[in-house]
Image: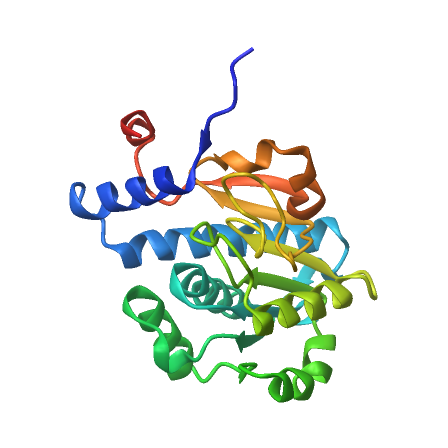
């Protein structure tokens, strides 16, 4: 039986760099593909969980309330793409920024600007007071998308991010809410599968290109839930290079 292919943090970085620099796939295209894949899996999870209702044979997307919680960097950028695709599908979507949007750069900044131009509903939760103020709106969600920290995370979760993670975990235990993690549950080290001081507990983790090395750690399964591997537009042979 073949051993499942896994990627380390460094290998993920090398794939991204090769795709962008050698294959000339713009980073914003990779981000678009990643976000679209997660949006599709989010809708699948909603159907499986009975969170979408039918009326005269058609799914009522507005019955699906999604909170997309975004950090900085590419993981947060993925979150903004996910929010846009779910919104365009007809879902009720609210975006929560745990990293100051003014500090975003590159592809993440582009996708944040798009949702601003679309005038999508959004809140900043950059400090404890803002997190508390957003509490009632967060409680509306029946699915939470975790786009806080990605494969680049290692070490300690910053105190405010840890507070956001703990709040999301608490909400996930109420009223049958589901959690989708983007690439890796926030707070989980993708190389060794060890949780941080606060780590998202997801029902589904949509990870990109291949499963991450740390997912082989049995302890990680408490946090990843079901793992779905999604492509981002890179050719399969690229994996042989790393």
Determine which quarter of the picture holds residue 168. Answer: bottom right
Q: Quadrant of the C terminus?
A: top left
Residue 56 at least partly seen: no
Residue 86 at least partly seen: yes
Where in the figure is residue 219, as x and y percent of width and height? 69, 39
Left or right position of 30 against 78: left
23 to 186, vertically: above or below: above
Where in the figure is residue 82, as x and y percent of width and height? 49, 62
Q: Tell which of 2 and 188 is nearer to you.
A: 188
Identity of the residue drawn at 36% across and 70% down: 111
Q: Tell which of 127 and 90 is nearer to you.
A: 127
Identity of the residue drawn at 72% across and 63% down: 169
Left or right position of 48 against 86: right
Q: Colour scheme in the image?
A: rainbow
Where in the figure is residue 15, as x and y percent of width and height? 30, 40
> Can you name the residue that lies furthest to the top here?
1
Q: Tell which of 91 and 149 is nearer to you.
A: 149
Q: Quadrant of the N terminus?
A: top right
Q: Tell which of 79 and 50 is nearer to you.
A: 79
Determine which quarter of the picture holds residue 231. Answer: top left
């Amino acid at each position: 039986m073949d051993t499942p292919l896994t990627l380390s943090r460094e290998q993920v970085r090398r794939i991204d760099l090769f795709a962008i620099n050698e294959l000339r796939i713009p980073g914003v295209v990779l981000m678009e593909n990643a976000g679209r894949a997660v949006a599709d899996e989010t809708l699948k999870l909603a159907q499986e969980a009975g969170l979408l209702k039918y009326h005269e044979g058609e799914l009522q997307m507005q019955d699906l309330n999604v909170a997309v919680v975004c950090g900085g960097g590419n993981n947060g950028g993925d979150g903004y793409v996910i929010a846009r695709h779910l919104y365009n599908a007809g879902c009720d979507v609210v975006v929560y920024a745990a990293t100051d949007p003014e500090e975003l750069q590159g592809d993440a900044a582009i996708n944040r600007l798009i949702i601003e131009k679309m005038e999508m509903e959004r809140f900043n939760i950059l400090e404890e007071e803002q997190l508390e103020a957003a509490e009632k709106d967060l409680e509306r969600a029946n699915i939470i998308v975790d786009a806080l920290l990605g494969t680049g995370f290692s070490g300690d979760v910053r105190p405010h991010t840890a507070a956001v993670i703990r709040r999301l975990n608490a909400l996930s235990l109420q009223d049958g809410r589901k959690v989708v993690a983007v690439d890796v549950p926030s707070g989980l080290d993708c190389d060794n599968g060890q949780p941080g001081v606060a780590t998202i507990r997801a029902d589904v983790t949509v990870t990109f290109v291949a499963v991450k090395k740390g997912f082989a750690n049995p302890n990680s399964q408490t946090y990843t839930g079901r793992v779905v591997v999604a492509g981002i537009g890179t050719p399969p042979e690229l994996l042989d290079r790393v």
